[in-house]
Amino acid sequence: MTILWTEKYRPKNLSEVLSQDRPIKEALDFVSSFKKGKALLFAGQPGTGKTLAAELIAKEKNCQLVGVNASDKRSAGEIEAAFSEVTKNKPLFWNGRIILIDEVDGIAPVDRGAAAAIAKVIKESAYPVILVANDAYAPKLKDLRKYCKIIKFAKVHALSIAKKLREIAALEGIKIGPEIAPALAKWSSGDMRSALIDFQVVSAGKQEVVQEDMEILGYRERLADVFGVLPSVFFSGSMAAGRKAIGDSDKDADEIFWWAETNIPKVFKESEGLAAAYDLLAKADILRGRVQKQQNWRFRAYMSDMLAGISVCAKANRSFVMFQPPDRFIQMGATKAERAGMAELGRKLGRALHCSSETVRKDYLPYLRVAAGKDEKFLDSIGISEEEKELF
């Protein structure tokens, strides 16, 4: 019998869950300092490890996991029957319990009694309660949210998915081309489970997976360079067209943001159009900041919407425009060798000082420069070459 890879390579402990260090830490802190009357609400798209994290937290804490699926247990009576005793009594062979209510946003709007029953479980349970939903802000969860601490699970990073797929390919003895794992990772849109299922499908019965094998998934190469994206962002007059161009691009939305910022003055000549374009760009920049600060990747989609809306809200100059790359990319290209040299110097000093290269840069480098200014032989004494002296 064929074993599903989603089960075969299911993480055995929390350290193996990809891209969710922050939400897992928040959840562990909540469970460790649990106070009655408050629950956790895990939210995020399918395949990000929400239910898995709850199971592994219970395992790490040596707690009995007691769970139901709210899509199946729809009535107040069913939910009360499932938890009437386990939320109060102490298990014999465990440190405690964790109550898991999965797919809580699967409650139908007519099942108002179910939401009230779940709220009652939260208020009365002597053990931590974890709710799992795709969308924490679904209207049907309005009454439950006030009893919950919301923890958002981000999409699994494409690089992490690709790395895991390569590891599995090696374990399964399957040879894959360099483009296969990144393509499957991007195709999955941050859903690790989906990527594993797709990989098992395309590699079934094969010792090698090539690009043509991806066609069984309906996959087609859909990448477009930035010069194919910007005309849609600036001239299409359609948010849908702009959004699709950004989604199909081989560039990250952040990179397209900087290309848009550089070329807006070339495309919009009238003050009204220029102001409207920059207004949308500013809103996109706010959303970029929220992605970085809150690690909430949902804002990335809204940021793309702001960029896609430029052609709708601003009147562009329809004459030919020679798009220019952002100055920051030009500068980064010009200083690439220097930055690589500084990184290597930081690692070298880090080994000598028993710290990270980042600590060297932030804390030690200013003092080392002072020491070198006072003693010309100081740099020789710590093994710095002539080329590195110039960088230093």
Image: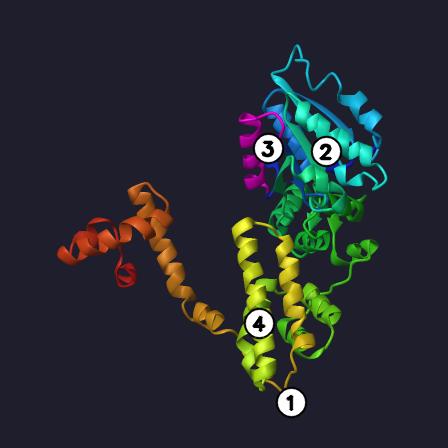
User: In the figure, is residue 364 to the left or right of 194?
Assistant: left
Instruction: Answer few, some or many: residues within 10 Å of disc 3's Cα (few below 14, many 20 plus, some between 14 and 19).
Output: some
The Cα–Cα distance between marks 3 and 4, rounded to whole angstroms, is 42 Å
Instruction: Answer few, some or many: residues within 10 Å of disc 2's Cα (few below 14, many 20 plus, some between 14 and 19).
Output: few
User: In the figure, is residue 340 to the left or right of 250?
Assistant: left
Give the x, y percent position of residue 208. 74, 49
Badge number at residue 319: 1
Give the x, y percent position of residue 78. 83, 25
Q: Secondary structure at mark 2?
A: helix
Q: What residue range appears in magenta?
A: 20-38
**Callout 2 touching callout 1 (CB < 8 Å):** no
Let me know if residue 183 is in the magenta part: no
**Callout 2 touching callout 4 (CB < 8 Å):** no
- Amino acid type indicated by mark 2: Lys
Residue at x 65%, y 64% (from the top left corner): 304
- Amino acid type indicated by mark 3: Leu
Instruction: Answer few, some or many: residues within 10 Å of disc 4's Cα (few below 14, many 20 plus, some between 14 and 19).
Output: some
- Amino acid type indicated by mark 1: Ser
The Cα–Cα distance between marks 2 and 4, rounded to whole angstroms, is 49 Å
**Could you tell me which quadrant the C terminus lies in?**
bottom left
Let me know if residue 21 is in the magenta part: yes
Q: Earlier in the sequence, mark 2 or mark 1?
A: 2
Residue at x 70%, y 75% (from the top left corner): 312
The Cα–Cα distance between marks 1 and 4, rounded to whole angstroms, is 23 Å
**Callout 3 touching callout 2 (CB < 8 Å):** no
Residue topped by disc 4: 279
The Cα–Cα distance between marks 1 and 3, rounded to whole angstroms, is 55 Å
Residue at the farthest left position: 374
Q: Earlier in the sequence, mark 3 or mark 4?
A: 3
State the predominant SS element of the stretch in magenta: helix
